[in-house]
Amino acid sequence: MLDKHGIAKRIAQELQDRWYVNLGIGIPTMVANYIPDHIDVEFQSENGILGMGRFPTEDEVDPDLINAGKQTITARPGAVYFDSAASFGMIRGRHVQLTVLGAMEVAQNGNIANWKIPGKMVKGMGGAMDLVASAQNIIVAMMHTNKAGKSKLLRECTLPLTGVNCVTKIVTNMATLEIKDEKFHLLERAPGVTVEEIKAATEGDLVVPAEVPEMKI
Amino acid sequence: MAVINKVVKDAREGCEGVQDGMTLMLGGFGLCGIPENCISELVRLNVQDVTCISNNAGVDDFGLGLLLKKKQVKKMISSYVGENDEFERQMLSGELEVDLIPQGSLAERCRAGGVGIPAFFTPAGYGTEVQGNKEVREFDGKPHILESALTADFALVKAWKGDTAGNLIYKATARNFNPLMAMAGKITVAEVEELVPAGELDPNEIHTPGIFVQRIFQGVNYEKRIEQRTVRES
């Protein structure tokens, strides 16, 4: 079973040289810590920076320089700032090759819900709807089950949707899965997790090949 | 012939004419790049029932949170309003109307309002509750929804440097919604950290041309509060 860092580490393996990548808040942010040395990628944050760098030292903190999670950041050499319309232009215009974001629920048709729990959490969608509606490549980073132990990989989402037919890949603490032909396809098991355990934790239709390799982390 | 001079003395003169029931745009992302001086002035003026278009709603005791606390806001148009308990309370109790909009659509709607585009199609929000009864149209086989432009009686923006002609330069990610809202205000008020005579800014480096700005003033006492101070060891 992976922890959150393990999920981030596995997703980092999906990044390709020269990609521009948008990382959401939470586990996705951690992906930046595990980029292989041999590839060059740039991180876009939708509040208006391309070339986002590490967190600042105490001396480097600049209140005018934050990421979309409102955390203080630094800018890498070659970084650029822009307004919010240009930022979402990059996203809608498909100039960003990969979006990694969290989810509360994913359905086997690629629908995703991650912004609202009616009556409980109504904070807004931020940039998530624009991101999922336009990205060519969306990887969802999340735990396989929720705090109550219920599956987050469903036949149909029960919460208000963020986007429809958009998720293609999911990395959880238990598995790597792909969505194809309105079904979840099991690609890999997390270290120490059995196919049976993954089946039991997946409510939606799950296609399991004869051989399911263990992730190499 | 002199350069058109947009300078006003301070936030009080800048916000002259803001009245109850008006629609206001306020730049900023979180607390980054918010018009601190103008917000303080709105609190002092105690204008009521205003509609605020702003990506976020501040925190309980800073930014737009100050207006919310005094119940001056009738409606918020935003993309994300977490981090504000009073906001959440007013929203859930129905005291406050809230229109939540995908962030990219919010940005583009402000831009559209400023540049004479009445509406546009975007894929964001299709198939979600954002779609509502908006017109849906397919382009290249993909469904899009029609979103309309936004404008405001006053747009209150914050820039780093500005000149007497109203030209503006923003710093780092404090740019965010400011240039878009600057274009969409009937009256745009810019507060800047450094106000210089026209001619001192390099025309190559100006982000917002002064034509979009009606009033500009040198701001004071910027707090620039940080919401999520995140640092690494050396």
Image (cartoon, rainbow, N blue to C red):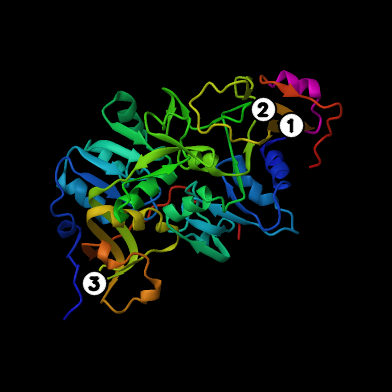
Q: Which mark is residue A11?
A: none
Q: Residue at coordinates 16% horizontally, 57% vertically from top-left?
A: B12
Rendered view: B32 above or below A201: below
Specify whether B11 is left or right of A86. Answer: left
What's the residue type where badge 2 is placed? His
**Marks 1 & 2, CB-CB < 8 Å contact:** yes
Neighbourhood count class around disc 2 (C-alpha, 10 Å): few under 14, some 14–19, many 20 upward: many
Q: Which residues are magenta?
A: A190-202
The residue positioned 17% from the left and 65% from the top of the image is: B8
Q: Is residue B112 above or below residue A110?
A: below
Q: Is residue B88 left or right of residue A41?
A: left
> Which residue ends up furthest to the bottom in the rendered image?
B1
Q: Determine if marks 1 and 3 fall on one subunit.
A: no
Which residue in the structure is indicated by mark 1? A175
Which chain contains the residue that carries disc 1? Answer: A
Q: Label 1's element?
A: strand
What residue is pinned by disc 2? A144
Number of other residues with Cα within 10 Å of mark 3, as a class: few under 14, some 14 to 19, many 20 or more:
many
Disc 1 to disc 2, how far (Cα)?
8 Å
Q: CA distance from mark 1 to mark 3?
A: 59 Å
Task: Please state the horizontal and vertical placement of residue B152, each as a whole percent of the image.
Answer: 24, 48
Side (left or right) of A63 relative to B86: right
Residue B108 at x, y percent in the picture: 39, 49
Q: Earlier in the sequence, mark 1 or mark 2?
A: 2
Q: CA distance from mark 2 to mark 3?
A: 57 Å
Residue B10 in picture, x, y percent from top left: 19, 62
Residue type of the residue flagged with mark 1: Ala
Are the two marked residues, 1 and 3, in contact with CB atoms closer than 8 angstroms? no
**Residue A201 on the magenta segment:** yes
Q: Quadrant of residue A169?
A: top right
According to the picture, the residue beneath numbered tag 3 turns out to be B164
Indicate the chain on which mark 2 is placed. Answer: A
